[in-house]
Image: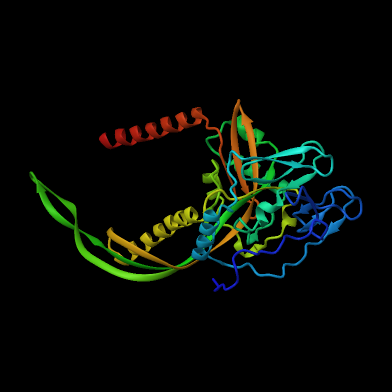
Amino acid sequence: MTDREEPIFDSETPPSSTGELGQSIDEGRGRIFPCEQCGADLEFSIGQQSLQCPYCGFVKNLTPPVDEIRENDYREMLATLKEQREQGTEAQYRAEDVNELRCDSCGANVVFQGTLTSSTCPYCASPLQRDKVHNASTRIRVDAVLPFLVPREKAAINLKNWVRTRWFAPNDFKQLGGKGKFNGCYYPYFTFDSATFTRYEGQRGDHYYVTVRVGKETRQERRTSWSYRSGEFPRFFDDVLVLSLKDDQATLLQELEPWPFAKCRPFTPEVLAGFFARTYDVPLDRGFELAKQRIDAALRQDICQRIGGDEQRVSTQKTAYNAVTFKHILLPVWLLAYRYKEKTYRVTVNAATGEVQGERPYSWVKITLLVLCIAAIILGIVFATQH
């Protein structure tokens, strides 16, 4: 975490539409990256980590970032957003919003809905991007992006292996391997840093055993001795991750953690070439509330360890959050939706580590057989002990 004295918002105009970053469409609402040799649209090459032409093979190296990934002051940003709301200049992107963008390649109008910020023209397959969504002065700018590191082919192999290890999946589903077409998408996240100071009160429970008589027999019974405990301690949290998108795949996306943040680079729009991208629709303050839930859960584990004993009761947990900073980052995900027996299942793949998480069908025949086997084993043990 670093102290920041520079302004949160960069008031300078985004790079010119005729500059090195590509061609701007409809006053900067979309952008393509033309090949310098054949004029086709360049795409981000995962293997080479550069822009590459899928037709003539031309490679354009990405410009090395000159700035470091910076932390933003959380409370300063909240004050700025509040001022924008009062002045009526805050930009909103909601799930029901629909915007049109003219494709410069074929002239077709392409619809962008909600938080989707880049796509391809369905008529000529040219990549389109609502560029000012990420660079507008009335939005929280993207600080960093983690480029796609796992190729589509590797993601497909990981998916096939994941399907084969689903023990309770139907056999024909495992043979199909979850076949389908992957789409690459950048998802928006906030990461929060905070220095915390926590005071707590609670009770420590220590187990002990006493001998009690029941009729003519005696047995050992466990009792618990409770004693008061309190204390205070500091702890610093770094890069607490929160998905800044209202998405029904949030659980699957969270299960893709952890992410290799060390491989992030300062945001440049070139890495979005050829991929979908979405922008945040979870407000910053709500994002921090979600981050505090994760922080508080970790602090509660710390408190229980500090209380010690065999059991713990936490009656009071008060935490101060200081020096809060955040980053707005984009993380890469391979998405797949496939159908099995008229039902759709979704899969997400961490495009930086290859981790696979997804939905799958269950074979109730296999589950029933397992339950019957367990029941038979239990009955066998009971029978053996009684004879």
277 relative to 320, above or below: above
| 345 over 330 or under it: above or below | above
In the displayed orientation, state which residue is furthest to the top. 342
- x and y percentages locating residue 306 in the rendered image: 32, 67
Residue 161 in the image, given as x and y percentages of width and height: 63, 43
Displayed quadrant of residue 270:
bottom right
> As rendered, which of 340 and 31 lies closer to the eye?
31
Residue 162 in which image quadrant: top right
Above or below, comparing residue 348 to residue 82 in the picture:
above
Viewer-proximal residue among 345 and 56: 56
Q: Is residue 255 visible?
A: no
Quarter occupied by the C terminus: top left
Percent of width and height locating residue 166: 56, 39
Image position of 305 (left or right of 129): left
Q: Quadrant of the N terminus?
A: bottom right
Give x and y (percent) for residue 151: 72, 50
Q: Is residue 23 left or right of residue 231?
A: right
At x 63%, y 67%, the residue is 69
Q: Nearer the viewer, residue 361 or 370?
A: 361
